[in-house]
Image (cartoon, grey):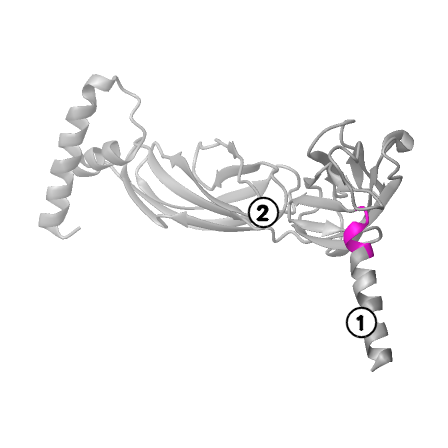
Amino acid sequence: MRMAITGLLLLVSVLAAQSGAMYLAIQGPVNGTLNNNGSIYLGKLGPGESFYVLASASTSNASGAYVNIGWDRFEAIGLPNGWSAQPSPLYENPMKLKITAAPYAQDGVYRLVLRAVNVGNYSKLGNITVSAYVNVTPNVFELNVSPPVINTGVAQPSNLYISINNTGISDDPFVINAYGLPAWNVSDEVIALHSTSSVFVYPVYVKEPGSYMFNLTVTSASSPLITKSYAITLNSQSSLSNDYYALGQGVVISPIILEPAYSVMMLLSDIYRLASGN
């Protein structure tokens, strides 16, 4: 019984010591509170992508007293070959450490050694060192495009709706392109924030009638290895109904005074399509 009580008291004393020890509060891309030599998994990262590790400057000292600005700088002191980092500016709160993966980093889990520094040991904290792990893979986003089939008039723009679900930890831009449409070479750069799903509008058109199959491609601006494509069919016909319908669906670039007329044209085209079963 005495040994059990002694063991319980020892456990309580250890937990109390840990609660009073200095710590590093990670605030992004995931949340976690780490003691010295602790570790945390941050998430997925594409080769060549950059991301930020955010951490609070606040901590506690050895006696458990709260220190508002205890950490003055956040830096990486151990990175895989080919990786780079930019430490946080002095006295920033929260601290933001930028890390960039090697352009052709192979798939796998990588260890990053990070350190928070009390400059000059002014608050008597010294440093705290932790390990962060990231999973490098080109599969850091999901892509969906609609509609898969477009029926439009000649030289009339139609909108594609591109859904990008960024499952990685980087906020680097994505570039949208359409490959396979004649005389079409228009790209659009968008930002899909990490752990967020966003929808973007991308207009396309052709100048000649016909049926065209093309690929709507989304590629990370950081690496050509991070890319996905979606097959789209565009049917372009020179007819009054299709021209009116495309005006309603596409990007109107004529004066705003004509918008009511376009609305009527689109309504007439809808009535025609319902009546004809198209």
Q: Position of residue 121 (x, y in %)?
A: 90, 33
Residue at mark 2: 227
Q: Which mark is residue 8?
A: 1
**Element type where label 1 sits in the image:** helix
Q: Is residue 189 visible?
A: yes
Sooner in the amino-acid sequence: mark 2 or mark 1 = 1
Residue range of the region highlighted in magenta in the rendering: 17-22
Q: Is residue 224 left or right of residue 62?
A: left
Report which quarter residue 173 is drawn in. top right
Image: 200 above or below 255: below
Please name whichever residue, 16 or 161, is drawn nearer the observer in this view of the structure. 16
Name the chief secondary structure element in magenta.
helix
Q: Is residue 78 visible?
A: no
Q: Is residue 78 left or right of residue 143?
A: right
Residue furthest out toward the bottom: 1
Q: Which mark is residue 241?
A: none
For the point 17% across and 38% down, the residue is 241
